[in-house]
């Protein structure tokens, strides 16, 4: 009889533990916001779904707060298809891999194709579509982690990823990406926020300076095709500051392919050493200036060419045509198939580490 009692007790304990685990798992699969900030008027809100930036508020030239990333009001909205690339970490491989195929270590890997013939931003269910473990480590820092199993979306190796968002006292947001793997794999992580330094409206009057004398021309599928090219004498020359709309509608085959800018810019080596910023973007109305510093070799610039004004954003705003700018520090698109590009291979025993910094100030000249 005593053995029966012990059996019933253990069965009850096991059931309770499983129920608690199930409850915890269910609880972990709900989207929520975590907000960090400083005492100078900067705040950043992070969502555990997609490890995404949902809000980034900084002071404008008149002292009023400006939310400089496009987004939605509630955590639940970020789980819907309309929000897929609003602010998340994209991976395993940000940007495009041609035909969803690459070879590594004598093996060929096939990925899901979710962008015409290509695999984009990690595939149909990339890092933007999963729940991350998230916690605030202090009032200015959020840490997120995710374990990507071997074979997820076709990629080899179990990958352990950590992202750290930290707000500085000097109105900067540092984003640090770490990862390790148990098999050789390819990796290209970045943040995919849509910036509008005025907070809303058309962004074509924003001024942009880019520390890039070259870019990677693409084919009609937006895959780099041929050698790296100079920006000199082309609409892709931002080495002298100009408004984004100045040349965006110029007669140019590359602009036709992207219906505007959707290209990777090759950053100066001085950017990767940390001695110079990658770019400087200025809001024409708000006076907000954002400079991006990074250790990555490329900057993907997308000018919101496919926004149609059909998606309702935060506070009733709309995704107006060319009203959001993606500026993504990263490695080059299709790098796994281009041995002439900087490598994106991560091997066991090595640690992937990438840092980008978004620094904000105010242009008071206008």
Image (cartoon, grey):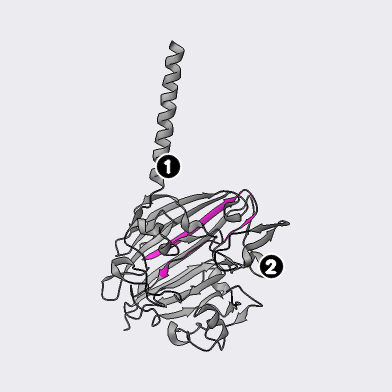
Q: Which residue is mark 2?
A: 339
The residue located at (26%, 72%) in the rendering is 63
The residue located at (33%, 74%) in the rendering is 200
Q: Which residue is mark 1?
A: 25
Residue 110 as seen in the image, left or right of residue 69: right
Earlier in the chain: of badge 2 and badge 1, it is: 1
Residue 34 % position (x, y): 35, 54
Say if 38 sits above or below 214 in the image.
above
Q: Let me know if residue 135 appears in the view.
A: yes
Q: Main secondary structure of the magenta part?
A: strand
Is residue 286 inside the magenta stretch? Answer: no
The residue located at (41%, 50%) in the rendering is 134
Residue 255 % position (x, y): 53, 82
Work out how far the residue at label 2 is from the one at label 1, CA to CA, in angstroms: 42 Å
Residue 187 % position (x, y): 58, 59
Mark 2 vs mark 1, foreground winner is 1
- Asked where in the image residue 213 lies, by quadrant, the reply is bottom right
Residue 228 as seen in the image, left or right of residue 327: right
């Amino acid at each position: 009889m005593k053995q029966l009692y012990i059996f019933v007790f253990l069965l009850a304990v096991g059931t309770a533990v499983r129920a608690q685990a199930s409850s915890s798992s269910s609880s972990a699969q709900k989207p929520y916001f975590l907000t960090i900030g400083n005492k100078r008027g900067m705040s950043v809100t992070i969502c555990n779904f997609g490890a995404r930036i949902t809000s980034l508020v900084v002071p404008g030239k008149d002292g009023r707060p400006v939310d400089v990333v496009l987004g939605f009001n509630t955590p639940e909205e970020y789980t819907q298809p309309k929000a897929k690339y609003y602010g998340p970490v994209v991976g395993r491989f940000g940007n495009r891999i041609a035909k969803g195929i690459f070879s590594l270590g004598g093996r060929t890997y096939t990925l899901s194709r979710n962008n015409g013939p290509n695999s984009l931003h990690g595939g149909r269910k990339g890092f933007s579509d999963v729940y991350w473990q998230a916690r605030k480590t202090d009032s200015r820092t959020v840490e997120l982690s995710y374990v990507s199993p071997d074979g997820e979306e076709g990629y080899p190796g179990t990958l352990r990823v950590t992202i750290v968002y930290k707000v500085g006292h000097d109105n900067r947001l540092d984003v640090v990406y770490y990862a390790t793997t148990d098999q050789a794999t390819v990796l290209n992580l970045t943040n995919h926020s849509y910036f509008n330094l005025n907070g809303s409206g058309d962004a074509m009057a924003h001024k942009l300076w880019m520390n890039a004398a070259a870019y990677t021309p693409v084919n009609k599928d937006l895959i780099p095709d041929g050698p790296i090219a100079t920006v000199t004498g082309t609409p892709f020359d931002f080495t002298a500051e100009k408004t984004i709309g100045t040349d965006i509608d110029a007669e140019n085959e590359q602009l036709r392919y992207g219906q505007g800018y959707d290209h990777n810019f090759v950053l100066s080596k001085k950017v990767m050493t940390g001695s110079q910023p990658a770019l400087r973007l200025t809001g024409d109305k708000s006076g907000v200036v954002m400079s991006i510093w990074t250790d990555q070799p490329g900057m993907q610039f997308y000018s919101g060419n496919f926004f149609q004004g059909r998606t309702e954003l935060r506070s009733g705003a709309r995704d107006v045509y060319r009203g959001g700018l993606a500026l993504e520090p990263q490695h080059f698109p299709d790098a796994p198939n281009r041995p002439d590009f900087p490598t994106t291979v991560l091997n066991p025993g090595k640690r992937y580490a990438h840092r980008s910094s978004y620094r904000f100030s105010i242009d008071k000249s206008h």
